Image (cartoon, rainbow, N blue to C red):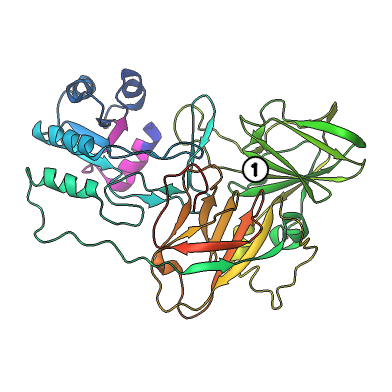
């Protein structure tokens, strides 16, 4: 923090007020404050205001009282209930803070989207990946639309300060473009010339994403079965070293997955010398607390029965680069190698196009029946979908990502299992609050 203070002072000068934001505990305030930086505090709607501001006063005896993060909602994790914070609680807390003459910054005031791989994660007793949507149950939604919470907050603010005259601006128009069918392209193993043109790194033991300078996305770890497995044999991550999900195939046949903190053993079969492919997914780095040094990939050895697996070929996968350059739609006849039309399990690419549209409006993509994966529109990574785990069921697509002058390319990387009918649906509303893949 001292380095950051010096850094900011050098570039911003002495007239800028630098401040810290810490949680409403003595431990956080002690560890997070620094002489020369104004100490503020943050808290939500269930906090005793007097207690919180008294704590700030102990660390900052003079100056304004500041709640620098009044939580208007909360974030979602995959597999958990959609978070909501009651509108009356938010407006009541805001009114009480302003009545004290204190200052407040609302977090979040407008929701957003964790496009690409930028969702992040939390860690308590285990790893929790944040969903793609950062709607946050905020006063302005993920799409920037006003909510009842915004109207309630406006009513509170106008008791203390003037607000603009006239009606609230309306929500932006949305459009349901309907269903688009997708065709299978192929699995990762069959497309390495495109996805990893630089070829593999050789390593006796597995190494991490960071060691091969791949910080997000996916990496393929490849080795061979050391012996024949006539009976199902456990593939084990004994030190919980899969960060964060590993999709396992033998000779191109999907076997199942290993998942950090959840699934540490998977049984496989095969012949000596068969190709063992493990696609590891970075599900987002822990960005809060003591676990922020969150390395990705295979952090420790995998054991197959009694054998430590060695002699790895490790492929850094530049999926985003390939798609940004037009793949797979740039193939003139859309013919792809080694496509097993009967297989829909394991990491597999699909492609399709949203035909010429008359107007480009905000829309929401639903992947009903799909399991888990990643979606790109016109080369832009929308983020992760996981309707089987929920609660998020749709992905937000801002209108400017769509084109009216040409076809809109859709690329899907399904990691586990595609539905029998491989199609996606463009809707005119978001579905963020479901733990099952509903219609």
Q: Secondary structure at mark 1?
A: loop
Can residue 55 be seen in this snapshot? yes
Q: Magenta residues, as a range? A: 5-22
| Rendered image quadrant of residue 92 | top left
Query: In the displayed structure, would residue 68 be above or below residue 402?
Result: above
Front in this rendered view, residue 142 or 301: 142
Query: In the displayed structure, would residue 291 be above or below residue 342?
Result: above
Query: How many labels, in total?
Result: 1
Q: Is residue 79 left or right of residue 16?
A: right
Q: Is residue 336 left or right of residue 136?
A: right
Residue 367: image location, x then y, percent: 54, 56
Q: Quadrant of the N terminus?
A: top left
Front in this rendered view, residue 438 or 411: 438
Q: Which residue is mark 1?
A: 209
- The residue depicted at 39 percent of the width and 65 percent of the height is 362
Is residue 360 one of those drawn in magenta? no
Residue 69: image location, x then y, percent: 28, 37
Residue 311: image location, x then y, percent: 84, 40
| Rendered image quadrant of residue 412 | bottom right
Can residue 60 be seen in this snapshot? no
Query: In the displayed structure, would residue 53 be above or below residue 437?
Result: above
Front in this rendered view, residue 435 or 277: 435
Identity of the residue furthest to the front in this view: 439
| Rendered image quadrant of residue 343 | bottom right
């Amino acid at each position: 923090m001292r380095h950051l203070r010096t850094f900011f002072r050098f570039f911003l000068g002495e007239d800028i007020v630098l401040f810290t934001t810490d949680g409403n505990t003595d431990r956080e305030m002690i560890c997070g404050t620094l002489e020369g930086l104004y100490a503020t505090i943050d808290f939500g709607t269930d906090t005793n205001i007097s207690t919180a501001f008294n704590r700030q006063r102990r660390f900052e005896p003079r100056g304004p009282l500041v709640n620098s993060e009044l939580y208007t909602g909360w974030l979602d994790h995959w597999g958990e209930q959609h978070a909501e914070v009651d509108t009356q609680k938010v407006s009541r807390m805001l009114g009480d803070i302003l009545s004290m003459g204190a200052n407040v910054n609302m977090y979040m005031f407008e929701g957003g989207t964790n496009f690409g791989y930028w969702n992040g994660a939390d860690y308590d007793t285990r790893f929790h990946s944040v969903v793609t949507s950062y709607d946050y149950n905020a006063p302005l939604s993920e799409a920037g639309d006003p909510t009842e919470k915004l109207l309630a907050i406006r009513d509170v603010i106008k008791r203390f300060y003037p607000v603009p005259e006239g009606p609230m601006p309306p929500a932006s128009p949305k459009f349901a473009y309907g269903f688009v069918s997708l065709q299978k392209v192929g699995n990762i193993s069959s497309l390495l010339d495109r996805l990893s043109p630089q070829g593999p790194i050789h390593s006796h033991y597995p190494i991490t994403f960071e060691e091969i300078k791949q910080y997000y996305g996916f990496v393929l770890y490849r080795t061979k079965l050391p012996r024949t497995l006539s009976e199902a044999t456990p593939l084990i991550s004994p030190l919980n070293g899969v960060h964060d999900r590993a999709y396992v195939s033998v000779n191109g046949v999907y076997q199942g997955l290993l998942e950090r903190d959840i699934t540490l053993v998977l049984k496989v079969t095969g012949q000596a010398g068969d190709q063992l492919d493990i696609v590891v997914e970075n599900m987002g780095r822990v960005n809060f607390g003591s676990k922020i040094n969150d390395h990705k990939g295979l952090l420790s050895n995998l054991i197959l029965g009694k054998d430590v697996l060695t002699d790895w070929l490790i492929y850094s996968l530049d999926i985003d680069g390939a798609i940004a350059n037009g793949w797979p739609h740039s193939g003139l006849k859309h013919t792809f190698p080694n496509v097993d039309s009967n297989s829909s399990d394991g990491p597999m690419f699909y492609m399709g196009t949203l035909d010429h549209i008359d107007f480009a409006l905000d829309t929401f993509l639903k992947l009903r029946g799909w399991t888990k994966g990643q979606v790109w529109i016109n080369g832009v990574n929308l983020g992760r979908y996981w309707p089987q785990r929920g609660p998020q069921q749709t992905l937000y697509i801002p209108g400017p990502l769509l084109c009216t002058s040409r076809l809109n390319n859709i690329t899907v990387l399904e990691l586990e299992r595609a539905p029998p009918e491989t199609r996606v649906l463009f809707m005119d509303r978001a579905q963020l609050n479901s733990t099952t893949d509903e219609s």
